[in-house]
Amino acid sequence: MRRPVRLALFAGLIVLIVFALSDALGLRESSTSVVGPLGYIEISHGGHNHYVPNDWDGEPEISAFPTSPPPEGMTVGPTGQVVPAE
């Protein structure tokens, strides 16, 4: 009886690890991933957050991006402007 329980716990742990890695590596879209489903992600910067596009490569500086999320139907453009979502 112990063996099936151990196998089930091990399988659950593997699923959790795969889920966490796919989220961290941007292999799936989610609000906590490096690829957000809305076209932008939230990045913590000191005591506040900035909203940057999914494909942001560090340029321009993070301070060019908004500190509040764009309104519904909008997203963050490559230079920090709020633009209509496609």
Image (spheres, rainbow, N blue to C red):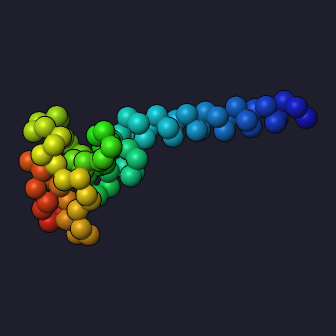
Residue at the (20%, 65%) spot, across then down: 74
> Does residue 25 appear to the left or right of 12 in the view shown?
left
Rendered residue at 40%/47% (across/down): 32
Name the one closer to the observer, 18 or 71.
71
The answer, for residue 28, to whether it is visible in the render is no
- Is 15 placed above or below 86 here? above
Q: Which quadrant: the N terminus?
A: top right
Does residue 77 appear left or right of residue 43 in this picture? left
Residue 11 picture quarter = top right
The percent position of residue 85, horizontal first and vertical second, equals: 18, 63
Residue 46 position in % (x across, y down)? 30, 39
Residue 24 placement (x, y as % from top left): 41, 36
Q: Position of residue 8 (x, y in %)?
A: 74, 37
**Residue 52 appears in the figure:** yes
Residue occupying the point 13% across, 37% down: 61
Camera-side residue: 49 or 16? 49
* Front one among 80 and 17: 80
